[in-house]
Amino acid sequence: MPKETFKLELGGRDIIVDVNNLAEKANGSVFVRYGDTVVLATAVMADKKMEQDFFPLTVEYEERYYAAGKILGSRFMRREGRPSDEAVLTARAIDRAIRPRFPKNLRKEIQVVITCLSWDGQNDPDAIGLLAASIALSISDIPWQGPLSVLRIGQIDNKFILNPTYEERGNGQFDLLFAGTDPDIINMIEMEGAEKGEETMLEAWQFAKQYSKKLLDFQKEIIKKTGKEKIAIKEAPEDKELENEAMKFIGDRLEKALYPDKNQIEKVDSLKEELLLHIEEKYPGKQSSVKKIFDEEINRLIHENILKKDKRPDGRKLDEIRPIEVEVGLLPRTHGSGLFMRGQTKALSILTLGAPSDVRLLDGMEIRGKKRFMHHYNFPPYSSGEVKPMRGPGRREIGHGMLAEKALFSLVPNFDDFPYTMRTVTEILSSNGSSSMASVSAASLALMDAGVPIKSAAAGIAMGLMTDESGKYKVLADIQGPEDHHGDMDFKIAGTKNGITAIQMDVKIEGINESIMKDALNLAKKVRLQILEKIDKVLPKPRPELSPWAPRIYTIQIKPEKIREVIGPGGKIINEIIDKCEVAIDIEDSGKIFITAEKEEAAKKALEWISDITREVKVGETFQGKVKRIMNFGAFVEILPGQEGLVHISQLAPYRVEKVEDIVKIGDIVPVKVIEIDDQGRINLSMKEVNARGNN
C-alpha cells in the first residue's frame, strides 16, 4: 500500500502524518501520531446537493476503548455505546474550528469522522484530532479553505508550555486551545483556568505564533505533495427579477421590524411569511432563493447600522448590557437556588449537596475516576417558544453545561475542606442569547445560596462582532437574537473579579486578529464587573451556614489498621451503624471516614459509635460493660462497641469464686477496670479492683 510520511518536531515530540489509501472510499483521510496517541481523520462529501437553507456538516469524534488497552462498557455489551461527554465536547470544538472555512453556498452533506486508535495517556487526542481533520480536509477534493494550526498552551509557574501533557495540565494554571488560519488570525478558542488576567491570554497567543507558522507550513507541504484538486462549486445564476421583486416588497418594512422593538423576532418572522406567500404567487418554487435574499438583507442591515451608526436592533449602546435581575433562595426545600435574568434570557440554577459516595464515576477511554462537582444544563423547548419532542440532553446541552462547569470548577472548595459532592442544574426558562453564560451566574448564585464556600462569585458574558470587507469592526457586549445569528463572532468569557476562568470562541468569518481579541477581552471584563456588582448587592458572599435541608457530613480520622474493625466481618458492623443511625458512611484507605446524614443527631450518633469502636483503651480506665460470654476461666465483657476484655475468674470478686455464674450472667451490666493490655492487644479487666476502690 503506497504511503507518504511527514514529520515535524513540536513541543519536544514528533508529529507524524501518514497519508495512505486505507480509507480509500473517503474524499480525504489521514493518520496523525503524536507520542503514542494516533488518530484517523476522514472527510466524505455526498454527491447529491441538498435543498435545505443551512450547511449540512456533521463532525463525529469516536473513542475506542482498545486505544487505551481497556475492555469497558456495560457488562452485557462490552463495547462502546453513546459518545461520552468528553467525546461530544471534542467533536463540538473541531466543528467550530472547521465550519467557517467551508464556502457559504456549499449545500452538499459533509461528514468528518475522527477516530482515536491509540492513546498513550499523555497526549490529548482532541488537538491531534482537530489537526488531523484539517489535513484530511485540506488534501481532499472537498471545497475547504484550510489549513488550520492547532496548538494547546499551558502555564506552570508563570511559564508557557507548548502542548502540555495531562500531568502538566493538571499542575498548570490554565489550559488553552487555539486554532487559526494564520499566526495572526484565530478562529476558535477553548480555555479553562484559575482566574487569569486578560493580558495573559494575549501573551499566550504571542507565545503560540512562532509554532503556529511552523505547523501551517508543515501542512502546506503535505497538501502540495498529496492534495487533490478541489471540486468546483457551481454558482446559482442570479435571478435579478426575483431579487428586485423581493426587495420591492420588503422596502423599509424589514428595518422597521428590526429597530427597535421588543417583539422584533415575531415581526421579522411575520414579514418573512408575507414575502414567501407573495413570491409564491408570482414565482412558484422559489422559496429557498427568497429566504436567502431575506436573510442576506437582515445581515446587511444589522452590519451596516452597527458599523456606521452604532445602532443595535434593541437600541442599546455597543458596550451596554441588558437589564440584570438577580434572586436567590427561590425554592424552599432545595439546598440552594439562584435566578439570573439578563433581558429575556432567564436561567434558574439549583444546587444539590450529597455524600462523598454520590460522586459520578468516570469510566471512559481517557478519564477514569470520580467527579465531585457537576453542572448540567437543560434547554426545554418552551424557553425558545417552540414545541419539540422532549428527549435526553443533546450536544448543545452537554456543551453548554460543561462550559459553565469549567468556569466554576476552579472556584469550588477542595475535597479536604468541603467533602461534599455538588451537582448544579440550570433550567433555561427563557432564552434570547447567551444562556450558557447566564448559567454561570445562576449556578454561582445557587452555590453561594447553599453556603458552599466558593472563592468568589462568577459571571459570564458573550461578546459579538461586526466587520466589513475594509477591515472595519465593532465589538458588541451581550449579544442577543439577530446579533448572534447574523454576527461574525460569539466570544463567551466567564470569570470573577480577579480574572478569567473559561473562554469559548467561534466565528463565522476567517478569524479575529489581536486587536479584536484585545478589545473583546477588555470590554468583557468591564461588563463582567458590572454583572458581579449586581450579584454582590443580592448575595455578596456564600451564606455562613449550609441550608437546613442539606445533609451534614462529619469526618473522623482513624488508624488504617482499625478500618476492618469498623467494617466488621462481612460488613456486619458498618451496616448495623448505617441502618440504626440512618446515615451514609464512606471510608478511605487512609483511615479517613465521612459520615453523612440528613439529621445532625444521627450523624453524631454514628460518629460516637465509630469513635468507640476505634478508641484505644488505656490501662486504668473504668467502664460499665456488658457480659457477652461466660467461660470456665472467666467472663468476656464488652466495654466499647466491638471491643471486649476478659475478666478472669480471679478478678471477679475479692474472694475465691468457684463458678463464674455465681457472680455474673450473660447480659449483666458490670463495672470493670482495665488492668492490662498484652503485646497482642488483648484486654484484661477486673471487677475486683473497681469494687475494692468503691469500698474504700
Image (cartoon, helix red, strand yellow):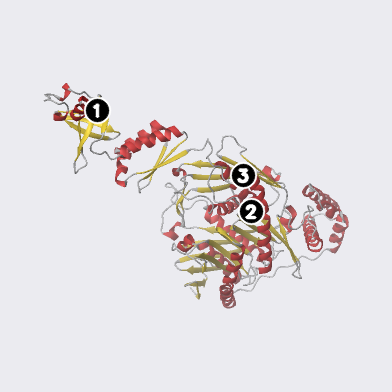
Crowding around mark 2 (Cα neighbors within 10 Å: few <14, some 14 to 19, many 20+) is many
Residue 323 screen position, x and y as percent: 72, 48
Left or right: residue 271 compared with residue 111: right
Give the mark nearest the N terminus, 1 or 2: 2
Camera-side residue: 374 or 138? 374
Whether residue 90 is visible = no
Helix, strand or loop status at disc 2:
strand
Q: Quadrant of the C terminus?
A: top left
Crowding around mark 3 (Cα neighbors within 10 Å: few <14, some 14 to 19, many 20+) is some
> Given the image, on which type of amino acid does mark 1 rest?
Pro
In the rendered image, which residue does mark 2 sit on? 460
Camera-side residue: 626 or 291? 626
Give the mark nearest the N terminus, 3 or 1: 3
Helix, strand or loop status at disc 3:
loop
> Given the image, on which type of amino acid does mark 3 rest?
Leu
In the rendered image, which residue does mark 3 sit on? 539
Left or right: residue 475 compared with residue 159: right
In the rendered image, which residue does mark 1 sit on? 671
